[in-house]
Structures are given as structure tokens and as C-alpha cells.
Image: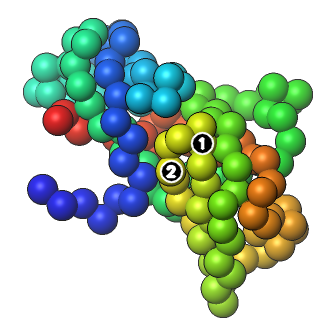
Amino acid sequence: MALSIRNQLPGTVVSVVTGEAISSVTVRLRTNQLVTAAITSDAAKELSLVEGTEVTALAKSTDISLATADSSLFGLSIRNKLPASVTHVSLGGAMASVELDAQGAIMTAAVTRSAAQDLQLSAGDSVIALIKATDLSLATV
């Protein structure tokens, strides 16, 4: 199956906490970083997610926000905080495409042009890629 989602990060499930409607699934990416996906409990069951299951974490580029400051310095409910380096910025009329290297996980964030300009993003900058757990999907391999 081919997907239009650009950010496809392979990893292994390290834990599944099942709730009545939503399950919290922690995945160790191949880059050794941990991410958490909040998916329906039905989906977790259908995918047979247990510790050791190989998965691909999927995030649309429009679901990735960027911070230039250390997000541990302020309260933030977003679970997934991946340190990254900007490798390329492409400014469009309304949006900007920001290519990232998050410790070997290659990702793309789509942010507004004005946000990219306000943050003064350019290649070589250090950022934190922020992804809400509810914006991270999982696919089995």
C-alpha cells in the first residue's frame, strides 16, 4: 500500500495501555527515540499490537509543529518532542515545507510561511518537532 503521508517512521511497540475507547501505544523508533500514539482501542486490537510488534508511525507533515526553544522550559501537553536539525526550508506563497533530520529520522513539517519567517528557520537550525499523540497513526508492517 502506498501512502501520501510523508513521515513514515519505523519502530517497535514497547507498551500498550488499553482504555475503554482509546489506547496509548509507546513505540521505540529505529533512531531509539520514543513516541506515543493515542489510537482507538478497537484499532489496537485489530492491529494485534503488543510489546515487540513492528510498526510504522505515521504523521502528516501538517500535523508537525516546530519549536525553536527547549520545550521542557514551559508546560506542554504534546507528548512527542523530537529534537531535530533543519536540513532545508522551502517557502511557498502561504506555506513553508521544512525538512528535518530528527537523529536519523527524516521528516517534513508543513508550517505557515509566516511561522517559518517568524522563527527565522534556515538549514542547520536546531528545533523540536512536536506531534500530538492523537495525530500519530500506526501501521503494522
Amino acid of disc 2: Ile
Mark 1 in CB contact with mark 2 (< 8 angstroms):
yes
Tell which of 39 and 21 is nearer to you.
Answer: 39
Read off the residue under disc 2. Answer: 106
Amino acid of disc 1: Ala
In the image, is residue 40 above or below residue 88?
above
- Judged left or right of residue 122, residue 105 is left
- Judged left or right of residue 118, residue 1 is left
Tell me where residue 120 appears, x and y as whole percent.
86, 67
Task: Give the residue drawn at x 64%, y 33%.
Answer: 81
Which part of the image, by quadrant, shows the N terminus? bottom left
- Judged left or right of residue 84, residue 43 is left
Q: Is residue 124 visible?
A: yes
- Judged left or right of residue 82, residue 120 is right
Task: Give the residue drawn at x 70%, y 49%.
Answer: 85
In the image, is residue 130 above or below residue 7?
above
Q: Which colour style is shown?
A: rainbow
Tell which of 86 and 58 is nearer to you.
Answer: 86
Task: Give the residue drawn at x 50%, y 43%.
Answer: 105
Q: Which quarter of the figure has residue 28?
A: top left
> Could you classify mark 1 by the number of other residues whose Cα lies within 10 Å: few (under 14), some (14-19), or many (20 or more)?
many
